[in-house]
Image (cartoon, rainbow, N blue to C red):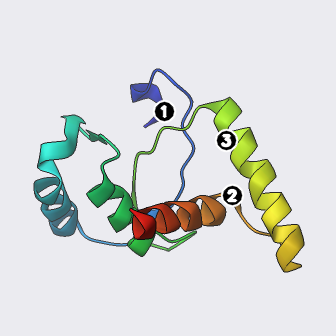
Amino acid sequence: MQCNSPVPLSILGVVPGSLREERELHDRFSEHRLHGEWFEPSEALLSHIAANAMESPSQIRVYHVTVHRALWKQVQKAAAAEGAKLGRPMPASEWLRAVIRKELEES
C-alpha cells in the first residue's frame, strides 16, 4: 500500500473478510472511489469503518486511510491524554474511531 501512496500511511483498523466481501464493499462505496483501492473518506465509509474496524484480526482487509504524520502525532497525543483520564492506555486508532463515531452521531 505505502508504495502506491505519495504520503505516509497509518493503518487505523482492519476488517476480516473474504475477497467476495471486499468486492461487495467496493461496489457499495463505488461512488466514493478516487481510483483503484483508494476512496474519499465519505460519511458512509467512515461510519462503516467506525462500526467494523478492529485492531488486530487474524484474516484482514485493510482500509486505506491516509493520515499525515503531523496529524497522526496529534492523534497519538490526544489518545494518550484520553487514556490517562480513563486510567488505561488508549491506542490512537481506538481514539480516532471514537471521534469519528461521535462526529457521525452528532451530524
Image x and y of residue 10, in percent: 57, 44
Q: Which of marks 3 and 1 is in front?
A: 3
Q: Do the residues labelled 1 and 2 touch (CB within 8 Å)?
A: no
Between the C-alphas of marks 3 and 1, the distance is 16 Å
Label 2: which residue?
92
Label 3: which residue?
72
Left or right of 6, for residue 93 = right
68 relative to 87, above or below: above
Residue found 22% across the figure and 61% down from its top:
22
- Residue type at mark 3 is Trp
Q: Earlier in the sequence, mark 2 or mark 3?
A: 3
- Residue type at mark 2 is Ala
Image x and y of residue 3, in percent: 45, 27
From the viewer's side, name the closer residue of 78 and 106.
Answer: 106
**Residue count near mark 2 (Cα–Cα under 10 Å), binned few <14, some 14–19, many ≥20:** many
Label 1: which residue?
2
